[in-house]
């Protein structure tokens, strides 16, 4: 006795249905594993958020830039100091 696949209660899928499902599955896998695409999307979202913040609250934007510069400067100083020892 053969078991009926719950995804296809009326029997096997047609080749077109199987192909469409395969394409969908492969696209989902590519979206999950494509790191450069994920990074570029995250950068694009960050840019949009930064522009929005700059327009809506310029003081907070400048404060954020100053904080980033302070962290980067501190990190550079710590690296140089560690190398110099």
Image (tube, rainbow, N blue to C red):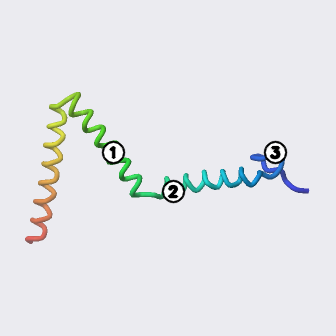
Q: How far is disc 1 from disc 2 in space, using C-alphas?
A: 19 Å
Q: How far is disc 3 from disc 2 in space, using C-alphas?
A: 29 Å
Residue 23 image offset from top left, x and y in percent: 61, 54
Foreground pick, 1 / 75: 1
Q: Quick one: quadrant of the C terminus?
A: bottom left
Which residue is tagged 3? Answer: 9
Residue 66 image offset from top left, x and y in percent: 13, 43
Picture quarter containing residue 34?
bottom left
Provide the secondary structure element on which disc 2 rests.
helix
Foreground pick, 58 / 81: 58
Q: Is residue 23 left or right of residue 34?
A: right
Sequence-wise first label, 1 or 2: 2
Picture quarter containing residue 1?
bottom right
Sequence-wise first label, 3 or 2: 3
Residue 30 image offset from top left, x and y in percent: 51, 56
The disc label shown at residue 72, or none: none
Provide the secondary structure element on which disc 3 rests.
loop
Q: Residues within 10 Å of mark 2 (few under 14, many from 20)?
A: few
Q: With respect to residue 7, does 2 lie above or below?
A: below
Q: Is residue 3 left or right of residue 73?
A: right
Residue at (71, 54) in percent of width and height? 18
Sequence-wise first label, 1 or 3: 3
Which residue is tagged 1? Answer: 44
Which residue is tagged 2? Answer: 30
Residue 83 image offset from top left, x and y in percent: 12, 70
Residue at (18, 40) in percent of width and height? 64
Residue at (79, 50) in percent of width and height? 5
Q: How far is disc 1 from disc 3 in space, using C-alphas?
A: 43 Å
User: How many numbered marks does the figure carry?
Assistant: 3
Q: Residue furthest top?
A: 56
Q: Residue furthest right?
A: 1
């Amino acid at each position: 006795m053969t078991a009926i696949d719950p995804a296809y209660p009326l029997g096997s899928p047609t080749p077109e249905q199987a192909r469409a499902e395969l394409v969908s599955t492969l696209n989902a896998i590519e979206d999950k594993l494509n790191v450069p695409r994920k990074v570029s999307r995250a950068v694009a979202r960050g840019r949009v958020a930064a522009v929005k913040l700059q327009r809506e609250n310029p003081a907070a934007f400048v404060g954020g830039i100053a904080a980033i510069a302070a962290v980067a400067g501190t990190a550079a100083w710590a690296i140089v100091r560690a190398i110099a020892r």
